[in-house]
Amino acid sequence: MLKLPGHNRYAYSPIIKRPNYSWPGGKRLAFYVALNIEHFAFNAGLGMDPSNRSGQQTTRNFAWRDYGNRYGNWRLFEMLDELKLPATILLNSAVCYTYPDLVEKIKARGDDVCGHGRTNAELLKPMWEDDERAAIKECTEVIEKYIGVRPTGWMGPGAMESNVTPDLLKEAGYTHLLDWPFDDQPVWMRTRAGPLLSVPYPLELNDAGTLVWRDHTGRQFADMVVDQFDEMLEQCERHPLVMNVSVHTYVFGQPFRLRRLRAALRHCKERAAGRVWFTWPRDIASFCALQEPGVIPGS
């Protein structure tokens, strides 16, 4: 019979055949907000542009993305402060020595910081293994130096991996990654150095794919957040789940989109009713590491 190329990172595990468990405090839905805070090369490398999908870098698309660090980040932080929501910062290490005010704000809030590569102007996938190892090492060390805490979670630039990225992350001391959108529960993945936890991270509730590439509006995205939350709040009575909303500061930092996102997240907070754990991937990973074998898929 036909045998297609595959991988051995995890085995098939249908949701209907898994053990039931609850998050801390008996909560059933773990919820986190991810802010992608990035730095790009000027007129070089890679970078998103909804008006020019050829990949060519221009002064205009650099400036559009730079808006996020000058304006969008600050409005999103204000929104999160107002709603009393924690954030997971997916951080390019180049941000650390380019935007010191952002670093101070991240430290003041005490947010969870995940390694997000050196810059989103490059991808790990085309690198040789030694070069990728060096890039991960540099990102990790720079974030630890400037933030003061070593990252233990990883989200690759562009969510693009090479065939050995999980192995290199585990060897570098990472405990969890967000690159694989294949489940709504955490799953232990296999690496050559031992297990690495995959924490759910969305392909759909991510403004990069939804707004930049598929031309949805901010209002449509906000409706998706509300619908996802309401549906998962019902489903989590049967299975513990993870929901994430991922935004880029130059996309949802735009005032007309920010208003809709604020309303959607307020809806989630108001409907939580003791069933939702507003958290970070770091704490999800710590919780999963303490469970008995067989509870978390792949363990």
Image: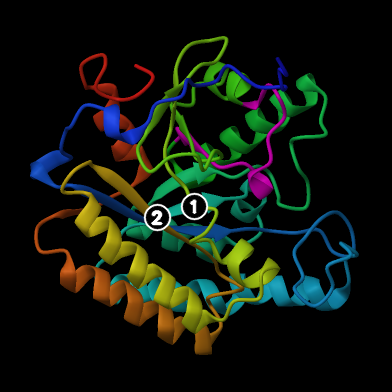
| Residue hosting label 2 | 244
Q: In terms of depth relative to the viewer, which is nearer, 41 or 214?
A: 214
Q: In terms of depth relative to the viewer, which is nearer, 152 or 162?
A: 162
- Residue at horizontal 21%, vertical 22%? 291
Give the left or right position of residue 73, taking residue 264 as reference: right
- Residue at horizontal 34%, vertical 72%? 226
Q: Is residue 157 magenta?
A: yes
**What x and y, as percent, mark residue 259?**
42, 86
Tell me which label, 2 or 1, sits earlier in the chain: 1
Q: Residue furthest bottom?
A: 256
Query: Quarter-wise, where is residue 249 in the image?
Result: bottom right
Image quadrant containing the C terminus: top left
What amino acid type should be assigned to the residue bearing mark 1?
Answer: Pro
**What x and y, as percent, mark residue 93?**
62, 46
* Main secondary-structure element of the magenta-colored stretch: loop
Give the left or right position of residue 118, taking residue 253 as reference: right
Say what secondary structure mark 2 lies in. Answer: strand
Query: Quarter-wise, where is residue 86 in the image?
Result: bottom left
**What x and y, as percent, mark residue 90?**
52, 51
Counting labels gives 2
Bounds of the magenta segment: 150-165
| Residue hosting label 1 | 202
Q: Look at the numbered discs 2 and 1 and tell me whether their residues touch, using CB distance below 8 Å.
A: yes
- Residue at horizontal 57%, vertical 34%? 140
Tell me: residue 240, above or below residue 121.
above
What amino acid type should be assigned to the residue bearing mark 2?
Answer: Asn
Give the left or right position of residue 81, taking residue 13 as reference: left
Query: How many C-alpha atoms fall within 10 Å of the one at disc 2: few (<14), some, or many (≥20)?
Result: many
Q: Which mark is residue 17?
A: none
- Disc 2/disc 1 C-alpha distance (Å): 6 Å
> Does residue 85 appear in this view?
no
Image quadrant containing the N terminus: top right
